[in-house]
Image (spheres, rainbow, N blue to C red):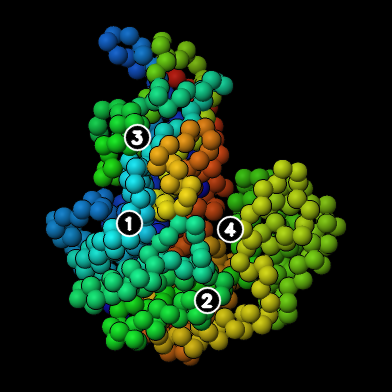
Amino acid sequence: MKTNYDIKLGVSLYSYQDNYYFHRHDLEGCIAAAAGAGAEGIEVFSDAMIPEWPYVSDAWIDKWNGWMQRYDVEPVCLDHFSDRMMWHDKQLTDEEMFERGVMYIKLARRLGCKAIRVLHEEHIGPKAFVCKLTDYDIIARLLPIAAENDVMLALEVHTSDGVGAPYQQKYIELAEKTGIPYVGLQQDFSTFSYCLSTADIVTQVAESGANKEVLMAAREEQRKAYFGKYDFDEAATAALIEKLNPSDADRLALHSILPSLKMPAGFVERRPFHGASRKAADYEKLYKDLYDNASKLVYCHGKFYDIDENGQVDDMDYPTIFKTLIDGGYKGYIASEFEGNRRMNMAGWCDEIEYVRKHHKLMRSLLGRE
Amino acid sequence: MYDSFLIRSDSLENFEENGKVAGFKFSVRIANYRGCFLGLHNGYYCEVDGVSYPREAQRLAVNGKPPRSFEELMKHAVLEHWDMQDEAFLYVYKEGGLEKGTHRVGILESILGAYGSSPRDEEYVKNPPDPSLGIGTGKTSVVCYYDLELQG
């Protein structure tokens, strides 16, 4: 349903990947589900859900346009990936990576999308991967092409230090410096995750036999710290968990938030949960940076993994995130991106369509629309 | 995670070549939510009733085409995409095939990471790793086991 609101709501079709994988809904069914949730915009999940990817025919584009009309929605964003490894015997050079970027931009234009979600070099940190993704120099080369095609390069920020980090700000400066306003930052709400998600707890209980009560006890300490606006005491929480006689599965499941908990023999070190070491002041700064940058953001991913009995996202403070975006003057789309499916489907069918519906209801209420 | 769903439970069958049972086959789904370009598919670690079958004994029938070796896929299917929705069949050569009854099948797919560009990937483009090493397993990093009844 089309609206004139400054903040519009969409759905990334990534949210329906299980419906698609298990043939419960085809692409049209996923679009219909998004429209049914009340979405007005669709983010298309390029290589997964465009059957002709990457050589998309005009006939398919016609079909796509027909769906957009039928369900009264509009195309918003195409997901770009920085795949260097396209061929088994060679990796893409920077030149070829640039060409891939051009391909995404042109396809976005043909689909009617006003943006591509770019997997840029710093999308999960200053030096995110050992891999080299689409970096600053490639983005700079893509910028005029993006302008020519009227497609925004939305650089998705998943990091723990958010959109205010200087290594992200350099892209806003690039748009200002060149006078070509076709690159900007996209905030993924996972940056604001403050505790272990219940979706992960469901997975751990189903897969490794961890005890729900033990995991929930640790999560509760994180929640108390966040809402009480004090620093999470990792050592005290680890000591509290020790008193509950945790199993090996519990210890492994909690390692990402309680690195000092004793691990079973043979344990292999993993990357900690990005909120594990964050302090109350860090959250304050994250929200301030979000506020300061809100009017410049070009897209948002309303990431969520689970929704609690009160209709709230279980590990992110949506009321504060939304208030900050509204007060900061954000104009653009917030697209639901449900990622609980992959986490919870080992424990049984995960009703993505219902999850997205609940998520849209929450977002509408936070925008004062219901 | 699609670990429980990578093989369809009623898909295990023997297959014939030149009038003789040459091996067995079963359906496979890709564990990655994006699908993959087949040039990156490096074969499976495949184990049946405790016996493992190397990549050289495997063929993949995908996209409606006859079974192809992984060597062929890696060299010639670089622009061919295996969509995340599509079922393929893994053919495994074993003279006489499998006996009637239930068999414990374990698989681990080895698909080289599309992001690429790490020193490790540089090594893999020269020397594709043995699938049993658990390398290039994408979204599923453990051997997934299924108890399958031989059909037909």
Q: Determine whether A180 is above or below A208 in the image.
A: below
A3 up-or-down from A113: above or below: below
Earlier sequence position, callout 4 versus callout 2: 2
Q: Chain of mark 2?
A: A
Say the numbered circle drawn on residue A162: 2
Label 1 close to label 2 by CB (< 8 Å) = no
Q: Position of residue A230 (x, y in %)?
A: 73, 80
Assess disc 4: are there few (<14), some (14-19) or many (≥20) residues with their C-alpha within 10 Å of its C-alpha.
many
Q: CA distance from mark 3 to mark 2?
A: 41 Å
Q: Quadrant of residue A232?
A: bottom right
Q: Which residue is mark 4?
A: A199
Task: Judge depth for marks 4 and 2 and give the one in front.
Answer: 2
**How far separated are the C-alphas under marks 3 and 1?**
31 Å
Is residue A311 among what the camera can see? no
Read off the chain for label 4.
A
Give the alpha-carbon distance from disc 4 to disc 2, as whole Å.
Answer: 23 Å
In the rendered image, residues at marks 3 and 2 fall on the same chain: no
Residue highlighted by disc 3: B88
Q: Chain of mark 3?
A: B
